[in-house]
Image (tube, helix red, strand yellow):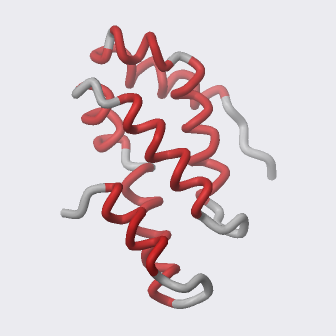
Amino acid sequence: MELVFQRLQGLKAVAPGTLEFALACQLLENSLADPFFLEAKTEAGLVFELASDLSETVAGLPKTRPMRRVLSLLDEAIRRDIHFHRAIPNHAFSMLMEQLLVVRLPG
């Protein structure tokens, strides 16, 4: 399995508007929206890296991608309490999920 930074590099290496670009976007979105991935990364103490991955992904995704808003909200939720998540990683994921449950997406 590729790492997120490898998928980010893949996204940057292909031309927007191509099928390959759409596939690269989909792979990134699937990785970063996977609750098991998020939990593993936070419990491993890699919350700063996760926040960086999310920010870079949101910046690289076209505004037309539906998951861009979700990943942006996830990035915001992580950054809001990033030092807490780093200090107490075993509670970070459950706290993060609680924060996300109260966020309502438009439409």
Front position in the image: 8 or 89 = 8
The percent position of residue 20, horizontal first and vertical second, equals 45, 86
Position of the N terminus by quadrant: bottom left
The residue under the point 47% across, 59% down is: 29
User: How many marks on residues?
Assistant: 0
Q: Residue furthest right?
A: 107
The percent position of residue 81, horizontal first and vertical second, equals 53, 16
Drawn side of residue 106 relative to residue 75, left or right = right
Front position in the image: 52 or 24 = 52
| Residue 58 position (above or below residue 82) | below
The residue under the point 40% across, 38% down is: 50
| Residue 96 position (above or below residue 22) | above
The percent position of residue 64, horizontal first and vertical second, equals 71, 69
Drawn side of residue 84 relative to residue 18, left or right = left
The residue under the point 59% across, 20% down is: 80
Choose top left, top right, bottom left or bottom right for residue 61: bottom right
Q: Residue furthest left?
A: 1
Front position in the image: 57 or 67 = 57
The residue under the point 41% across, 59% down is: 30
The percent position of residue 32, horizontal first and vertical second, equals 42, 50
Q: Residue furthest bottom?
A: 18
